[in-house]
Image (cartoon, helix red, strand yellow):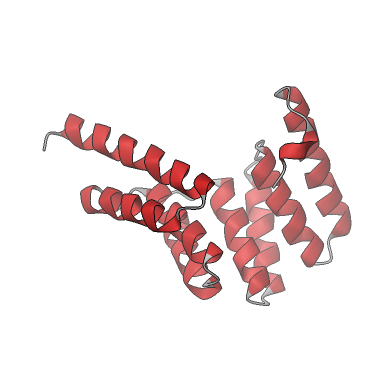
Amino acid sequence: MTARGSSSSITAHHGAAQKAIRDGDLRQAHAHCLAILAIDPDFADAWFLCGVIAGRNGAADKAADIFRKAITLAPSQAEYHAELGKQLIALRQPREALDAATTALSLAPDDPPTLNTLGTVFSHCGEHEQALVCYEQAVLALQRRGKGTSSLP
């Protein structure tokens, strides 16, 4: 397969994986992620999506490990750090979760889902003022995009 063919195949699988996750079809999403990783084992977002899948399946240990792999490949993705923090809360590792959330926040996320996740992590770590700031930023980001607040997860 040519580089261009690989790229278009990855793009197609990536979009399909994201849609499958939104639709709750985790098996299909996983299949698309595996197809991506067969083409490019260093495609960070495929690893990230696998972490999301593991987390939704209740495998917090596995999800945290997968998020760490994604972070190794793309350390500037705030969403990856935020989701790691969420899994670390599930694993009852609040100090590590707080570190992950702090790192995510330092990357200046501006997307409502990531800010919402950070609010949750900070809240579970007892950092309620920081949690409130994240929730407020999430609402403002939604308003800037012309959406109501009802679409926060």
Count of numbered badges drawn on the protein: 0
Which residue corresponds to the image point at 70% horizontal and 72% vertical from the top-left? 95
Residue 76 visible at all: no
Can you see residue 131? yes
Q: Quadrant of residue 2?
A: top left
In the picture, which quadrant includes the N terminus? top left
Q: Is residue 10 left or right of residue 4?
A: right
Residue 110: x and y in percent read 67, 36
Rendered residue at 87%/58% (across/down): 128
| Residue displayed at 45% across by 43% down | 18
* 107 displayed left or right of 80: right
What x and y, as percent, mark residue 3?
A: 17, 34
- Asked if 74 appears above or below 144 in the picture, the reply is below
What residue lies at 54% left-to-right and 64% top-to-bottom?
Answer: 55
Residue furthest out toward the left: 1
Which residue occupies the extreme right position in the image? 129
Image coordinates for residue 78, horizontal then vertical, percent: 59, 47
Q: Nearer the viewer, residue 50 or 99?
A: 50
